[in-house]
Amino acid sequence: NMCAAPNKKAPPPPLPGLVLMGLSGTAASWGEFCTIPFDTAKVRLQIQDKANPVYRGLADVLTKMVRDEGVTSLWKGVSAGIQRQCAFAPIRIGLYEPVR
């Protein structure tokens, strides 16, 4: 029948709150892990002496960090960032629907 409505799938049921909170904390932590090298480089650029700069740009900061301090220096401070994400993201995402 040409006039019949197309078959539509029902939307999936919403995730349980604790699952949603766990997934949001995991996603935010992964985001923190991926972006902390750039954030660290940004801060080093911001705090350097403008009259006698050590770094010439983002790539220069990252290169010098790896060369002088080792590759793990790119993730200095990541544990604090992940703790923050694990605390705030689940609350922010998990409480969105109930508070909305």
Image (cartoon, grey):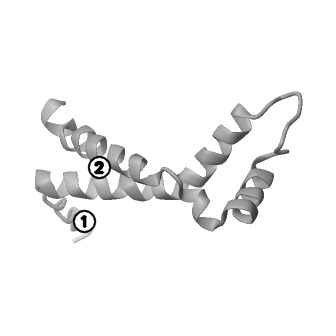
Where is residue 5? Give x, y as percent: 21, 62
The C terminus appears in which quarter of the rendering?
top left
Report whether 83 appears left or right of 35.
left
Q: What residue sits 76% from the left and 34% below the top?
A: 48
Which residue type does callout 1 highlight? Answer: Pro
Crowd tier of the residue under label 2, counting other residues whose Cα lies within 10 Å: few below 14, some 14–19, many 20 or above: many
Question: Relative to 3, does residue 81 appear above or below in the rendering?
Answer: above
Residue furthest to the front: 69
- Work out how far the residue at label 2 is from the one at label 1, CA to CA, in angstroms: 42 Å
Locate residue 90, reporting x and y percent.
24, 46
The disc at residue 86 is 2
The amino acid type of the residue labelled 2 equals Cys
Q: Are marks 2 and 1 in contact (CB under 8 Å)?
A: no
Q: Name the quadrant containing residue 74.
A: bottom right
* Depth check, front residue: 60 or 23: 60
Q: Between tags 2 and 1, which lies in front?
A: 2
Label located before the other in sequence (2 or 1): 1
Residue bearing mark 1: 6
Q: Residue furthest right?
A: 52
